Amino acid sequence: MSTPRTKIGVIGCGNISGIYLQADKTFEAIETVACSDLLMDRAREKAAEHSIPRACTVQELLADPEIEIVVNLTIPKAHAEVAMAAVEAGKSVYNEKPLTLTREEGHRLLQAAQARGVRVGCAPDTFLGGGLQTCRKLIDDGWIGEPVGATAFMVCPGHESWHPSPDFYYQLGGGPMFDMGPYYLTALISLMGPLKRIAGIARITYPERTITSQPLYGTVIHVNTPTHVAGTMEFASGAIGTIVTSFDVHASELPRIEIYGSQGALSVPDPNGFGGPVRVRRAGAKEWSEVPLTHGYSVNSRGIGVA
């Protein structure tokens, strides 16, 4: 007898929703039965596109007794409010990152979930993919010895040249550290262990940015969150890491992530993906060697964290 699939409802039908709305075609444990958005036309469009049985209001979705998990894909500043509403409705919730905008909101959400007996999860889930899981195995198996340091760089020119509605990337809850930093920090902590202390500096480099994508071409964005962030981390193991995230860099040849060990170095694939090349250069070697992936889910598998 097959195990019943867990019913999920998706709130927020924006740019990222497509991959989540088709997750139940990859993972047999879940079934998407409803989607919702403040713009009902957008919810109906996504429901039709991905064969979701029902497009409905947020209130209707939260009141549906068959939905056990809410996937919260709203904009960052709405994450806490929507997640709390889901918890109060007796449903587990999986947020896109960030979990909330402040630690206080996060603590309140977790406390409410514990009181209600439901669970809270959060993206990114890319560390469960084949690329980063292979890196985890190589470190565990001693390929580079004891990890002593790491670097991570996520630098790009920002999103106003391609995203159809990029303003929120430059408001509270946006910026490179909140938008892309979670992929890199999650990868680092997964590979290097917990952090002991951190320090950093950040700035708003350009107070205004002009959208060059459609349909808002020419619109000026007033920036209200740092767009260049540099940080230093000390891991509980004693290893030291450096991270830079920026929307102010037009071009770069910096690696995504590298882990440095006592017996070699590990080149980690893009943590915003699930696969990618994994390369190792062990002590004494003259060149980097690519290592075949040892784990599955190497293509876009967003939703694995929900499943």
Image (tube, rainbow, N blue to C red):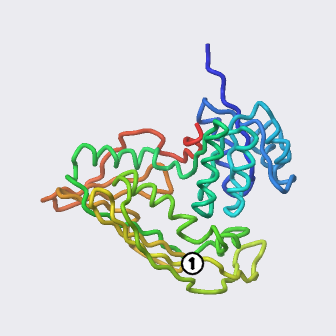
Q: Quadrant of the N terminus?
A: top right
Answer above or below: position of 173 versus 183: below
Answer above or below: position of 62 versus 191: above
Answer above or below: position of 265 versus 3: below
Where residue 82 sits in the image (x, y, percent)?
A: 73, 52
Q: In the drawing, does residue 57 fall left or right of residue 139?
A: right
How many marks overall? 1
Q: Quadrant of residue 235?
A: bottom left
Q: Quadrant of residue 5?
A: top right
Where residue 33 sits in the image (x, y, percent)?
A: 76, 35
Nearer-the-camera pick, 270 or 87 = 87
Where residue 123 sits in the image (x, y, percent)?
A: 56, 51
Nearer-the-camera pick, 100 or 291 = 100
Q: Quadrant of the C terminus?
A: top right
Q: Residue at x 42, y 53 (%)?
A: 276
Residue sitting at the far left: 284
Nearer-the-camera pick, 2 or 192 = 192
Nearer-the-camera pick, 187 or 296 = 187
**What element does badge 1 sit on?**
loop
Q: Quadrant of residue 34?
A: top right
Q: Amino acid at mark 1?
A: Pro
Where residue 125 sits in the image (x, y, percent)?
A: 52, 48
Residue neighbourhood size for the residue with mark 1, other residues' Cα within 10 Å, grouped as few (<14), some (14–19), many (≥20): many
Q: In the drawing, does residue 158 fall left or right of residue 199?
A: right
Find disc 1 in the rendering and name its residue.
Answer: 226
Q: Residue at x 68, y 57 (%)?
A: 79
Q: Residue at x 30, y 60 (%)?
A: 259
Q: In the drawing, does residue 45 fall left or right of residue 290?
A: right
